[in-house]
Image (cartoon, rainbow, N blue to C red):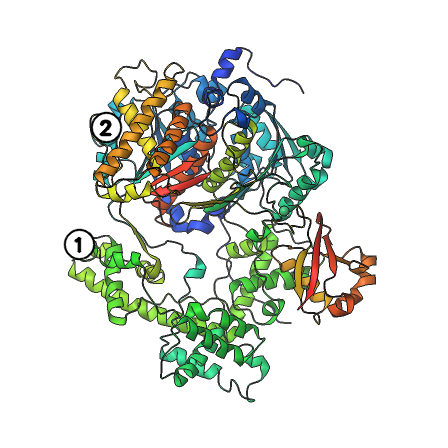
Amino acid sequence: MAAAAVPTTNGSATRRARWTYSDRILSRPGAYVDEEDGFVPGEAPITSVENARILVIGAGGLGCEILKNLALSGFKKIDVIDMDTIDVSNLNRQFLFREKDVGQPKATVAANFVMKRVPGCTITPYVGKIQDKDQDYYLQFNIVVCGLDSIEARRWINATLVDLVDMENPDSLKPLIDGGTEGFKGQSRVIFPTMTSCIECQLDMHAPRAAVPLCTLASIPRQPQHCIEWAHIIKWEEERKDVTLDTDDPEHITWLYKKALARAQEYNISGVTYSMTQGVVKNIIPAIASTNAIIAASCCNEAYKIATTCAPCIGMPGQNNYMLYTGDTSVYTYTFEHQKKDDCPVCGNLPKDLVVNPTSTLGDLVESFAERPESQLKKPNLRSEGKSLYYSSPASLMAQTKGNLVKPLNELLSDGEEIAVTDPAFSTVFKYRVHFS
Amino acid sequence: MEVQVPPPLQDIPTAKEKKYDRQLRLWGASGQKALEETHVLLINNGSGVTGVETLKNLVLPGVGQFTILDSHVVSEADLGVNFFLEEESLGQFRAEETVRCLCELNPGVQGFALTEPLETFIDKDDVLKPYNLILVSAPLDSAILARIQLYANALQIPTFYFRSTGFYSSFSVLLPTAFPIVDTHPDPTSTTDLRLLKPWPTLSEFVREKTKGLGTESMNQHDKSHIPYVCLLLHYLEQWRDKNGGKNPETYKEKSAFRELVREGDANEENFDEACANVLKALNPPTISSTVRNIFAAPEIDELTTSSPSFWLIANAIRQFYNTHNELPLPGAVPDMKAQSADYIELQNIYKKKARQDCAEVVETVRQLEKQTDRPKEHEISEKEIENFCKGAAHISLVRGRPLQIVEAGKPITFGDRAKAMAMELTNPESLIGLYICFLAWDEYIATRSTPSNENGDNGLKIPGSTDKDYKTDETKLIDMAHIIVDNLLKEANTSIDEPESSEIKAQIAKQCKELVRAGGGELHNLASLTGGMISQEVIKVVTRQYVPVDNTCLFDGIASRTYVLRI
Ligand SMILES: [Zn+2]
């Protein structure tokens, strides 16, 4: 790669003057590390951080902060992936973007801004999905930092990095640092794939919100949200089936809002607003600059410690690996060790026990996989040891297997049998051992 | 088909609401207004990144105005750690350059730079008056910090003092001696208050109507499966009392038996599931929290004057309500539950009506108090404010601001009435009191070793570890100073710690001192950004008077990745 542009008037001495504070930490011994931990104060850790290749997934609220923080921590080879374009509602926290950038891809605008501010740092943007990239791509990096708002994407990169681990090749182990925020709360965690608890092990920390039953929406709405969901799920299908709902299109949101408002008036329900409509339909999570700053900086602090070994990071086997931050009432952090699960479908090797009612149907079981906090699979495909039980896709297999949905489980399975569940969204096989209750 | 008249659309968001959408969902229009009326002053010292990062998080959500007072000139080292500077900033005033780069973030925010030295700035009268919040970063001359505190206290301006060096940071907030909060945003699951042990006639009437025929053939399964769980619980409570001498289930065992009784009503229906799940929570007798009790016992509630803050008048009225009814005004919210639409709406209205009645009683008392205290008509407390208070009465909060602990040369470091509590913190392995003591030693080192001249490059301030030459001896000095603070704290608290615990505590403090000296007063960008994030959250809580701020000192350990809050 071409040498990054450094102002030629600066000699190397003044160039190092720029890193006075970080260099001081890296060139003096630490109170919590010694040479046995691999920390040799001086040139070595400085070179390590400069040469480390680090991948940032997401260039949104957390991503902007992460890119800034890594660049000012001395990382010089950064890649960033994001598929989104800039929206006006990003501007209250995504500080690398301006009004003139609305509509532009986040990854490119963010990378260019940080490179301009921090000369000598190269940031390579990719506008697209993480799923576009193959194993060879991810193998290039030393550390992966995630600032995402999607559970699906986190699960995908987690499974990919676990798959990447080759016991013969220590370089194949990529520490994964993940951050997330909601309002004044957030969490940051460090994962050493296959060695410590992974995102799939921790999935129950993000239990899905209980969905409102369809019959409530259809016939007995009680809350303004029920009216909005009715407009969103039922009315749109009925009246505008051939238009794909675009939740960023104000005309679409206004249409849903009007429908929801009329329904609410019919049932004497108050509280439907435009803002609520948008919130429900887009599943909006409140987000502010402050919390993003806290969580992103925590992630990058761990990345800096991992790359330089100048102080112990969190996430080592047997150590704390998870920090929960709560800022709405005083400030409280809970930093703890989340235990690795032997029956984790991604990093464990034992099937998970699953107690089922033998007279319930396969259809019930299929539905339950979407709601189970530890699986959250929306399009599950099920196989038993001997046969295909159900495929939600492709259509040909679905046609062959959907007859099974109405059959009771004891007709399809025996007590103690193992089943494998997959979902087109993930590369992982979820193994379960079925026990009849 | 009938022509539908479109309902009026009055709340299509404005451009500003669109931009601030994600935060308005947290603090609403009133919080946003308070933020926009705020003028923050940052008195920036040292490497100065934490303060600028704090401002970033305030400029983005639209703070009204900010001013940076900083006489430093941008150095190479600044460019490696501060994001709000550019190559061209080198050699310019840091205040002017950071203000310029911060203003780019939000065209709606005004920023000002002051490049005057702090010591002449603070000498002038009324110089802090234009600001409603002050941020002060370490290190600075402790005598000046004491003056800032004196003025801030007199003007009741919330003030933050913070230090960030290497992997450690701390911030303390000076709040007014009474800082009450009504809008505390409690967890919604903790706020449900259905008063099932004390139903009022309209509610009981509704329950009788909805449960008529329950348990007999005359009620069909569809109706049965749509009885709101509130009605189920009240219905079975009456049955229970009939069989148990008029008493409600009180012990855990009785509550479990009561749950069985509800379960016998139906084994499968969702509304019965909901009723069973809510037995324990709904049958707790109403109690008021210790915070509310403290507010009811506060001197301000009885010393009402013409100019008392509205909080104390309403609190007084609510206390009268509580003394009369032995319960707080009903909040009136009903959680969602399986029910027919019309039944649920009716139930909601029953609760709302009762809440309005309770509130009306409080309003009446407030009006009497206003009359008794000769409150001017233009300061009459709005019904909306009283209603909001009634809704959140169980969750109001009060922070008692305390002065910053300022270390001045030649004066002993004391903890006063907090000495005993802080000495106890020393033996709590979770506590970061040790780190706090290291910071006090750090302040003491600077206060006692600085020179008035500018020979050390930072307004004459000498920072431990800032030169390679003195770095090792500074370590020893700082550790000694921190250990003396520990010994004096134990003396002041009139207590002692046995061996080996005492040596272990001191060994831990020695390590933390070493880390502080290692950084030599320089900030790591990540720690500065993280600390700026925490401070800006607190600033937002303080200016919006929503959520509950830190009381009063927060420490962050970037090695263990955790915080700890101390009341100093
Ligand atoms: Zn796992």
Q: Earlier in the sequence, mark 2 or mark 1?
A: 1
Q: CA distance from mark 2 to mark 1?
A: 40 Å
> Which residue occupies the foreground of this view, B455 or B17?
B455
> In this image, A56 relative to B337: left or right?
right
Q: Is residue B6 among the parts visible in the rendering?
A: no
The amino acid type, in three-letter code, at marker 1 is Thr
- Give the residue at mark 2: B408
User: How many C-alpha atoms fall within 10 Å of the one at disc 1: few (<14), some, or many (≥20)?
Assistant: some
Residue B536 locus on image (x, y percent): 40, 39
Residue B6 vertical position relative to residue A72 in the rendered view, above or below: below
Q: Residue at x 67, y 20 (%)?
A: A1
- Give the residue at mark 1: B306
Q: Residue at x 17, y 54 (%)?
A: B306
Q: Please give the chain letter of the residue carrying mark 1.
A: B
Residue B7 vertical position relative to residue B175 in the rendered view, above or below: below
- Label number found at residue A393: none
Q: Is residue A62 among the parts visible in the rendering?
A: yes
Residue B317 locus on image (x, y percent): 24, 63
